Image (cartoon, rainbow, N blue to C red):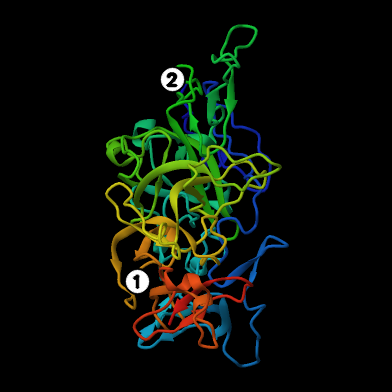
Amino acid sequence: MPLRTSRVLIAALSVLFTACPQPMPGADGGNTFDAGNPTPRDACSGGCAANQICDIDTKTCVDACGGCPVTDGGPAQTCVKVMEGVFQCKPFAISCGTDVCQQGQVACLGGACSCLSSLSGALDTCQSAHKWCNGRNCANPKSLQQCIPGDMSAACPANFTCQPVFGDDLAVCTRSCMDDNECQRGEACSQVGCLPLGLFRDQECNQNKPAPDGGWERDDAGAILRITVPVSNTCLLKDNAGTPTEGPSTGTGNCTYAVFQFWNDGVYPFDTCRPPGTATEGQPCKDDYAAGALATQCATGLQCAKTRGGDDGVCLRMCNAQPPALGFPPSPACNMDEACVNTLRYTDPNSNSVLGVCMKKCNVFDAMKATCAPVGTNAASCVPTEASGELVVSNSGDGICIPQRPSINMIGEQCSETDSFRGAACGSAQLCTSVTADDSATCTGVCDVECNPADGGTGPTRCATEPNARCTGGKTCRRVTSTSGARVGFCL
């Protein structure tokens, strides 16, 4: 029984985002589109906007400046990060140097016009142009991003249309289709275009339920039982009627996210089971599930970590990045010498599972751990950042071995990506960051502030042999944070 039902008015399929809709009956009695309400999530999940910080007590994104003053007749101001952990109120940018800023570009960053965004999508300054912030510029919406029907100045990509999947006020770009063959792997054709299978009834991520004797549990009729599993697990592949197409097992599919982005409501990830490709751990991958692209789709148990720019990345093992709760360790877990990296910076309000990837642990101040082995054929940098994504700069020097982008820069050179989870843009023991809002981001070396005391002393005895303890080239070790006990500083 196909997921795609007979074509009727698009409005009949639309699901109100703020209500609990009834499933839409299929014309042939088969599975139907049944997204329902989005799952509640931590308000800071996915990261706050570039001019916000997360209030850990209320778990909400708040203005990092505490609100910029409004003066009669004076220029409007917005909050801008001028260096790591430091924010200031700056006038809304009309121009930066000789560059005239476009609609949605509200700030001068690195001396150039820039839009402001967050990983969650909420508070994207390009909303005023019905677009999305991509780097410094406002770009047209892409697949599953909110769009405005009929707005050709901010149109969806070729072969996509802006459809009211969640109601007229929450339309998203979907691939146009007449049947399932026109959709990507793990998608089905509906009246509003191709949608991830996880949005349809009976398409949950399932595994067969193991029995204590090593077999599989069965019901009274002898049918093998199935259990629903969250993201980061493998899952049973199914046909369009929701029936598994592979024998009793944990499945060969990958339970991952289908991510919807809305300007005012942020990111809503849905669990969905994607068929595996043939790319193994450490091999290149792309966020492209076309039937002819199996070679760049990750194999069973792997997720594409987008570390090479855009939709390109490296296949890494899936893991559960949710912090432990009530004494239950997250599963699946990484090896002891690895960290589960929350590359999307999500949190699960049910303390269940968040999709992460396994990367080797490192420490920029430890001679035995400061060097990273390649990930497949990709060189990796030891970046002193937290795997949880909560702190951009770790306090202790602990970090993770992150695959490098296709090209990296040297210390002092301008770099292309300040979010290290999107690939290391600099060498080991460096971060791509800017000191002020007027400076471009550059590769900045780190140092141990305890080895550079203000009184001119030598610091603890470990400083004599510790790598990256002190700065070179006439630079001074500057404290990055006022957090008590924090050792990591910047060489400036």
Q: Residue furthest top?
A: 221
Q: Determine which quarter of the picture holds residue 316.
A: top left
> In screen coordinates, is 379 left or right of 386?
left
Callout 1 secondary element: loop
Callout 2 secondary element: loop
Q: Residue furthest bottom?
A: 73
Q: Residue furthest front?
A: 461
> In screen coordinates, is 424 left or right of 220?
left
Camera-near label (2 vs 1) is: 1
Q: Position of residue 361 (x, y in %)?
A: 46, 53
Q: Position of residue 257 (x, y in %)?
A: 50, 43
Task: Out of 458 and 139, give the one closest to the viewer.
Answer: 458
Q: Position of residue 423 (x, y in %)?
A: 38, 59
Q: Amino acid at mark 2?
A: Thr
Question: Where is 240 relative to 272, above or below?
Answer: above
Res. 104 in view: no
Q: Which residue is mark 2?
A: 245
Residue depicted at 37% across the width and 86% down the height: 474
Residue depicted at 48% across the width and 21% down the height: 249
Question: Where is 304 relative to 489, above or below?
Answer: above
Q: Determine which quarter of the picture holds residue 194.
A: top left
Q: Determine which quarter of the picture holds residue 481.
A: bottom right
Residue depicted at 40% across the width and 73% down the height: 445
Task: Out of 149 and 46, give the one closest to the viewer.
Answer: 46
Q: Which residue is mark 1?
A: 415
| Mark 1 surroundings: few (<14), some (14-19) or many (≥20) residues within 10 A | many
Task: Out of 100 and 296, give the one closest to the viewer.
Answer: 296
| Mark 2 surroundings: few (<14), some (14-19) or many (≥20) residues within 10 A | few
Question: Where is 44 relative to 329, above or below?
Answer: below
Marks 2/1: CA–CA distance = 47 Å
